[in-house]
Image: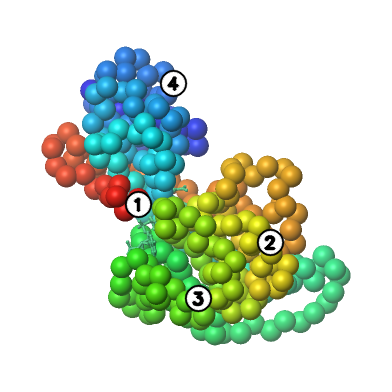
Amino acid sequence: MALLFASTADDPELWRRELGRRLPGLEIRVHPEIGDPADIDLALVWLPPPGLLASLPNLKAILSLGAGVDAMLDDPTLPADLPLCRLVDPSLTATMSEYVLLHVLKYHRMQDLFARDQRERRWQLRLPAPASSTRVGILGLGVLGTDAARVLAGHGFSLRGWSRSQKQLDGVACFAGPAQLPAFLAQTDILVCLLPLTAETTGILDRDLFARLPKGARLVHVGRGAQLVEEDLLDALDRGQLGGATVDVFVQEPLPPEHPFWAHPAIDITPHAASYSDPAVGADVIAENIRRFFDGRPLQHVVDRARGY
Ligand code: NDP
Ligand code: OXD
């Protein structure tokens, strides 16, 4: 009975310490020091090498160290019948909402324009408008989108959100499904993408979608790289259809040095760093699922593989 830890983005020793505090008897093996693969019952992973999970003959459940599991679902060797649980962690949610607030405020308070003025040594007073006059639209009203909406509402922004199924959220005008997407976009000054990557959302941030936003709208993209058609973003910025974009996720990560986003004056990039799962917090959630597994109780946050998230 052992848990395999495999992630190149997370510190195994921090997770070992935090999980060990909560589950003292748990044996943790850190990839690539697996030992006998037949000993592994559970895998705690982020972007595991394709084929790794399929090589564990007694694996019974997969726990993701990330909220989005698209990369794992993309691995054709992923064992089809095992529960795959995504991470729903208060520290990841809080850091994501912080990132969204930071960049929405940047655009609302015209900090992007002040930065350009500074580069051009231009002293230009720009007076702020009330937050209620800035319309923020959130694509995806799941765990992260709902919390971002709550935080933005606390700052007085005018909010709308779009999801697959119809929602009712206090202070958020809710839209659902492809038919209501145009109406949602027409009243969005700052668009935040917090969608999972699925067949339906691949390439959703494209020329047609940008054309439906008010001219000069801004984009904050924190979903997944493949949702954005990168050349359409460059084109929309060049034509002034979009006024600026903040991008955290890319088709190719790390972003290659020659990529045009690096030096574009209207694009701010961060290296897939919008949120962070603090092991001291996230271990509560993971440990609860491990206890459930050993007690034979239903696991939490199991991904619906047919839906893709
Ligand atoms: P959830 O599963 O909780 O929420 C997903 C939301 O997207 C739901 O509201 C869902 O609608 C909606 N949605 C899915 N497909 C569609 C569709 N075709 N049309 C309209 N709405 C759709 O996920 P989280 O909020 O936890 O995470 C969202 C994503 O954020 C992750 O999958 C990941 O890609 C990204 N992420 C990025 C990070 C970063 O550092 N940049 C960090 C963490 C996550 P419904 O409610 O109706 O099901
Ligand atoms: C995630 C991420 O999905 O960090 O958790 O991208």
Q: Secondary structure at mark 2?
A: helix
Give amino acid for label 2: Leu
Q: Is mark 1 within 8 Å of ligand 1?
A: yes
Furthest-right residue in this view: 121
Mark 2 or 4, nearer chain start: 4
Residue 252 in the image: x percent, y percent? 59, 44
The answer to whether residue 208 is left or right of residue 44 is right
Residue 269 in the image: x percent, y percent? 64, 54
Real-space CA distance between mark 2 and mark 1, rounded to the nearest whole angstrom: 29 Å
Q: Secondary structure at mark 4?
A: loop
According to the picture, the residue beneath numbered tag 3 turns out to be: 185
Real-space CA distance between mark 1 and mark 3, rounded to the nearest whole angstrom: 23 Å
Disc 2 vs disc 4: Cβ atoms closer than 8 Å?
no
Mark 3 or 2, nearer chain start: 3
Mark 2 or 1, nearer chain start: 2
Q: Is residue 22 above or below residue 300?
A: above
Mark 1 or 3, nearer chain start: 3
In the rendered structure, find residue 309 and report the number of the disc placed on it.
1
Give amino acid for label 3: Leu
The residue sitting at 40% across, 27% down in the picture is 51
Give amino acid for label 1: Tyr
In the rendered structure, find residue 234 and report the number of the disc placed on it.
2
Mark 1 or 4, nearer chain start: 4
Disc 1 vs disc 3: Cβ atoms closer than 8 Å?
no
According to the picture, the residue beneath numbered tag 4 turns out to be: 32
Furthest-left residue in this view: 296
One can see residue 73 in this view: yes
Give amino acid for label 4: Pro
Q: Is residue 56 above or below residue 199?
A: above
Real-space CA distance between mark 2 and mark 4, rounded to the nearest whole angstrom: 40 Å
Q: Secondary structure at mark 3?
A: helix
Q: Where, by quadrant of the figure, is residue 241 drawn?
A: bottom right
